[in-house]
Amino acid sequence: MTTNDSKAPLPKITSVRTGAIFTLPYLVGLEKGYFLDEGVDLELVAPGAYNVSVKPIEDHHLVSSFGGISRGFEDGEVSLYRACEWGQVRRAQDSGRGGQIVTQRAAIASQAIFVRPDSDVFHPQSLRNKQVAVNFHHGSHYLAIQTLEGFVEPDELKVVHVGGPADRFKALRDGTVEAVALMEPYISLALKQGYRLIAEAFYTGAEIADEKVDPEVYAAIDRGVRRAVADINSDVTPYLHYFTEEIPEDLGTLDESDISPWRLRFADPQPYAPEQFDQTYRWLLKWGLIEQGSEFKKLVDNRALSS
């Protein structure tokens, strides 16, 4: 542990307070004072609004990779932003302010595809030519494709943009779409309310940072995150309230006992490996989700975790 004994001001780093499924190590680290212990003044700021569409959008080109909750990074309001691996590769290419991937994130989240209880869909093949609501350029978008591409032909795979998880849940409830991709705590909410689970898969993510997050500062943040991950993996129950508090009142209620701890996976951050980048980049190109012309060394700088 590195204790800051100097009277000099601590380096201030801001990041977006996304859902607990992605941000829990930061929430725990702040609760326990780990980042201050390590000599960093870390602040989580409220995310911007999701890009919400009342009518599902079919063309992903109509939605920016830096829209909604990720816009704060590109606008310079935050220096550190965590999201799914695929979206971060895309953002590192799109970034006009030089954002780069600096590590894999600690959160290993899942997205699950649900249909209504009265649906005639019982398995993934039944989703052929049916709209699956996602948030374009975020984990729900990419993982829905990866989950379903082994079951249906590409031209029969119909992911559509609706918005954030609460918006997607409402769209399913109201019959706007036939299926949705959800993460925790909305997976637990859907199961509690009797929605039918069709498929689920886990995925990694990445942190994207600007030039303010130098190697020494990121190393301090990483130490705080690792301490928090150890606490979470020792006993996650003290932190389940972060999940239940995210459910809007109009969607229902969720008790801590409704959440399955095995679904909450967190690991120490790791460098983003070139071979993993290459595989992800090829897949994004195959689906027309990124442009040609970028290399690992341009989009990735593992900084403090390169060794």
Image (spheres, rainbow, N blue to C red):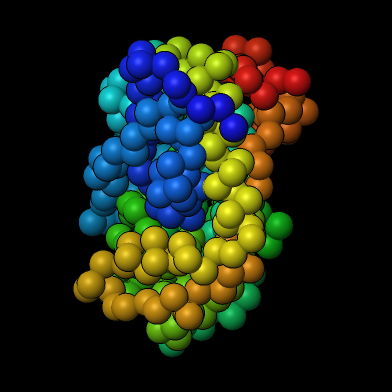
**In front here: 59 or 237?**
237
Q: Is residue 81 visible?
A: no
Residue 89 x %, y %:
56, 28
Residue 228 x %, y %:
55, 47
Examine the rendered structure and indicate whether residue 118 appears above or below residue 69: below
Quadrant of the image for the C terminus? top right
Q: Is residue 228 visible?
A: yes
Examine the rendered structure and indicate whether residue 62 appears above or below residue 204: above
Residue 95 x %, y %:
42, 19
**In front here: 243 or 189?**
243
Residue 114 x %, y %:
49, 71
Q: Is residue 126 left or right of residue 42?
A: right
Q: Quadrant of residue 234?
A: bottom right
Examine the rendered structure and indicate whether residue 235 appears above or below residue 188: above
Q: Residue at x 37, y 28 (%)?
A: 41
**In front here: 59 or 188?**
188
Q: How many marks?
A: 0
Q: Is residue 30 left or right of residue 120?
A: left
Q: Residue at x 48, y 33 (%)?
A: 37
Q: Quadrant of residue 180?
A: bottom left
**In front here: 296 or 172?**
296
Q: Residue at x 39, y 32 (%)?
A: 42
Q: Residue at x 28, y 25 (%)?
A: 77
Quadrant of the image for the N terminus? top right
